[in-house]
Image: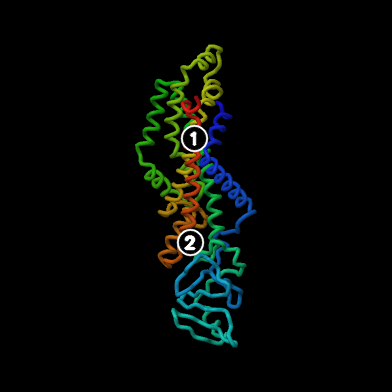
C-alpha cells in the first residue's frame, strides 16, 4: 500500500491537517491528564460538600443582579447557603453582611455559628486564573472536568476499538476467504446482531450490569463490530481470487498465512478508516448511555456524566450554562476532527484519486 503517496495527498488537504493537529493535541492532553501531570483530581472524594465556619473559601459563581453572568470565581468571597442566603465574608466595622434576594442585613460574626447548620457550600480558595471556565454548583473546576472527560473519551474510543476491530476482522476474513457454509454462518451471525437496534441492545445488556467503565467498554466493543465485518468480508471476496493469492496457494502456504500475511495488509486501509468513524461512535454511545442514567458510575468525569450533571444544574439554576456548553463544544470539536480525518483518508486511499 503506497502510504507515502497517501501521506502526500493528505498533506495537501489543509482542513485534514488542521484536524489531525487537533487530534494530536487532544491525545497529548489526555495522556498528561492520565498520568496526573495536568488537571486536578475531580473524583467524588475530592468534591467539596461542606466546609467549617472560618475556613477560607472562594466564590463558586459570579453573581450580579441575582444572576450568574459568567463562569468564574469572584475576587472577593461569598458563602452560598442551602437556604438561599448569601454570606459575604468581607467585614465592615466588625460586622458581616447577609443577603436574601436584594435585601442586605448586617450581623456580628457570632451569627456564623447559627448558620452552620444550613450547610455552607464553598471551594478552597485559589487564584482566579485557576478557573478559566469557572466552576459548577458543586465547586468543581469545569476545565479540569472537561480534560478528564477528554481522557475518558480516548480510553473509550481506543479500548472499544481494540475489542470490536479484531472481532470484525477475524469473522469477516473467515467468511470472505472460505465462503460456503463458513460464510453462511458468518452472515447469519452479523445479520442477527444487525437486526436488533443497537441502542436497545446496549440498554438491554447494561440494565443487568453494574455501573462501571469496564462493563460499558465491553458492551460497546462487542456490539459495534458488524459494519466493519461486512466491509472486511466483501474485500476478502475480491482479493481471494487475485494473482498474488493464487501464487501463494500454489507455493503451498497455509490459509492462515494467506489471510493474515497477504490479504489482510491489502485491506488494512478499511480498518484504519473505520477506526476514525467508530471512535466517534463509541464516545457518542457513552454520552447517550450516561445521559439516560445507565452508563458509567456517576463519580467518573466522562462527558456523558458532565452533560447529565449539567442538565440537573440547569434545572436548579438556569443561568449556569458553562458546564453543558463546555462539554458540548469539546465533544463537537473532537468528533468533527475525527470525521474530517476519516473522510480525507478515504479520499486519499481511493485508487481513482491516486491515478
Residue 302 x, y percent position in the rendering: 50, 53
- The residue sitting at 34% across, 37% down in the picture is 195
The local crowd at label 2, few if under 14, some if 14 to 19, many if 20 or more residues have their Cα within 10 Å, is some
Cα separation, mark 2 vs mark 1, equals 34 Å
- Secondary structure, mark 1, is helix
Residue 259 x, y percent position in the rendering: 52, 23
The correct choice, above or below, for 328 with respect to 47 in the image is above
- The residue sitting at 42% across, 30% down in the picture is 230
- The residue sitting at 40% across, 32% down in the picture is 190
Residue 322 is tagged as: 2
Residue bearing the label numbered 1: 273
Q: Nearer the viewer, residue 20 or 147?
A: 20
The local crowd at label 1, few if under 14, some if 14 to 19, many if 20 or more residues have their Cα within 10 Å, is many
Residue 5 is tagged as: none
- Secondary structure, mark 2, is helix
Q: Nearer the viewer, residue 267 or 254?
A: 267
- The residue sitting at 43% across, 48% down in the picture is 206
In this picture the colour scheme is rainbow
Q: Nearer the viewer, residue 330 or 196?
A: 330
Residue 261 x, y percent position in the rendering: 56, 23
Amino acid at each position: 500500500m503506497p502510504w507515502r503517496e497517501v501521506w502526500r495527498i493528505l498533506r495537501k488537504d489543509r482542513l485534514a491537517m488542521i484536524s489531525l493537529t487537533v487530534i494530536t493535541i487532544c491525545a497529548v492532553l489526555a495522556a498528561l491528564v492520565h498520568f496526573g501531570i495536568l488537571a486536578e483530581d475531580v473524583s467524588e472524594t475530592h468534591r467539596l460538600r461542606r466546609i467549617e465556619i472560618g475556613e477560607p473559601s472562594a466564590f463558586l459563581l459570579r453573581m450580579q443582579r441575582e444572576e450568574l453572568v459568567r463562569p468564574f470565581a469572584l475576587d472577593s468571597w461569598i458563602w452560598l447557603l442551602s437556604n438561599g442566603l448569601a454570606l459575604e465574608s468581607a467585614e465592615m466595622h466588625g460586622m458581616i453582611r447577609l443577603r436574601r434576594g436584594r435585601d442586605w442585613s448586617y450581623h456580628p460574626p457570632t451569627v456564623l455559628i447559627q448558620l452552620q447548620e444550613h450547610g455552607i457550600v464553598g471551594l478552597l480558595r485559589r487564584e482566579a486564573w485557576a478557573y478559566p471556565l469557572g466552576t459548577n454548583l458543586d465547586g468543581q473546576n469545569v476545565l479540569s472536568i472537561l480534560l478528564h472527560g477528554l481522557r475518558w473519551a480516548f480510553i473509550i474510543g481506543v479500548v472499544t476499538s481494540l475489542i470490536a476491530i479484531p472481532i470484525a476482522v477475524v469473522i469477516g476474513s473467515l467468511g470472505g476467504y472460505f465462503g460456503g457454509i463458513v460464510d453462511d454462518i458468518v452472515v447469519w451471525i452479523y445479520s442477527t446482531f444487525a437486526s436488533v437496534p443497537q441502542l436497545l441492545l446496549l440498554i438491554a445488556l447494561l440494565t443487568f450490569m453494574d455501573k462501571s467503565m469496564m462493563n460499558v467498554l465491553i458492551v460497546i466493543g462487542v456490539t459495534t463490530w458488524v459494519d466493519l465485518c461486512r466491509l472486511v468480508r466483501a474485500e476478502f471476496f475480491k482479493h481471494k481470487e487475485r494473482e498474488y493469492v493464487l501464487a501463494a496457494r500454489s507455493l503451498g502456504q497455509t490459509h492462515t498465512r494467506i489471510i493474515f500475511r497477504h490479504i489482510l495488509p491489502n485491506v488494512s486501509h478499511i480498518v484504519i478508516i473505520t477506526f476514525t468513524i467508530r471512535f466517534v461512535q463509541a464516545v457518542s454511545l457513552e454520552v447517550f448511555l450516561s445521559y439516560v442514567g445507565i452508563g458509567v458510575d456517576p463519580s467518573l468525569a466522562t462527558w456523558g456524566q458532565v452533560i447529565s450533571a449539567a442538565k440537573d444544574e440547569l434545572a436548579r439554576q438556569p443561568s449556569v450554562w458553562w458546564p453543558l456548553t463546555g462539554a458540548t463544544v469539546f465533544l463537537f470539536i473532537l468528533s468533527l476532527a475525527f470525521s474530517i480525518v476519516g473522510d480525507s483518508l478515504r479520499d486519499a486511499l481511493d485508487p481513482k484519486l491516486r491515478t
